[in-house]
Amino acid sequence: MKPNKFKRRKILKISHSMEIIDKVLYRYFARVVDIFAIYLLSILVIVVFVNVCSRYALNLSLAWSEELAKILLVWVTFIGAAAASRRGRHLKIEDVIKRMDEQRQRKMYIYINVIVSLFLVFMIWKGFSFSIAMKDTVTDALRISNMILYAALPVGAILMLPYSIRNIIYYCSDNKGRQKK
């Protein structure tokens, strides 16, 4: 039985839309996230290296370096989580899902990504409200607002959300196959 023209057009539109979404998310958006993560990690390594050298070579501890390293580590964690989300590298247990037939696997992946998306929206909402609540407190050594530290949570969640939504669209469409890595 041949699919009617309307269904073929619908499949082509969804397929074309997925190509555009993938191009934006996996080429451009991902590149920015990766470069930002590399940049932050590089600064973190330099700050920790300078602190270790000054502590052991000069017997001088830089108070600001520990605080900056803490802030950078939190940001690298959440930006790295977005990069891991894009690659599908978060911790997951797939033994049960792999034993299911293809249709149930797709439903399970939709369900998982809907739950993840809802959780990310919750993290964005609570993260922003908590960040705003911390705007008047400052760090001890650097004297910068703690809002910068706590803003990593909603920013990381915002960077992860498009990948989760993309996966929902992908598994709801007529595409066959697995999540793009």
Image: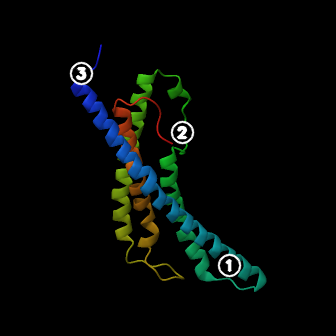
Q: Which residue is mark 2?
A: 92
Distance from Cα at disc 3 to Cα at disc 1: 67 Å
SS of the residue under disc 1: helix
Q: Is residue 115 visible?
A: no
Q: Which residue is mark 3?
A: 4
Q: Are marks 3 and 1 in contact (CB under 8 Å)?
A: no
Reply above or below: 51 against 117. Answer: below
Left or right? Give the position of 68 relative to 6: right
Q: Amino acid at mark 1?
A: Val
Q: Residue at x 68, y 83 (%)?
A: 61
Reply above or below: 179 against 123. Answer: above
Which label sits on residue 50? 1
* Mark toward the start of the polypeptide (1 vs 2): 1
Distance from Cα at disc 2 to Cα at disc 3: 39 Å
SS of the residue under disc 3: loop
x and y, in percent, of residue 74 in the image = 52, 64
* Mark toward the start of the polypeptide (3 vs 1): 3
Q: Amino acid at mark 3?
A: Asn
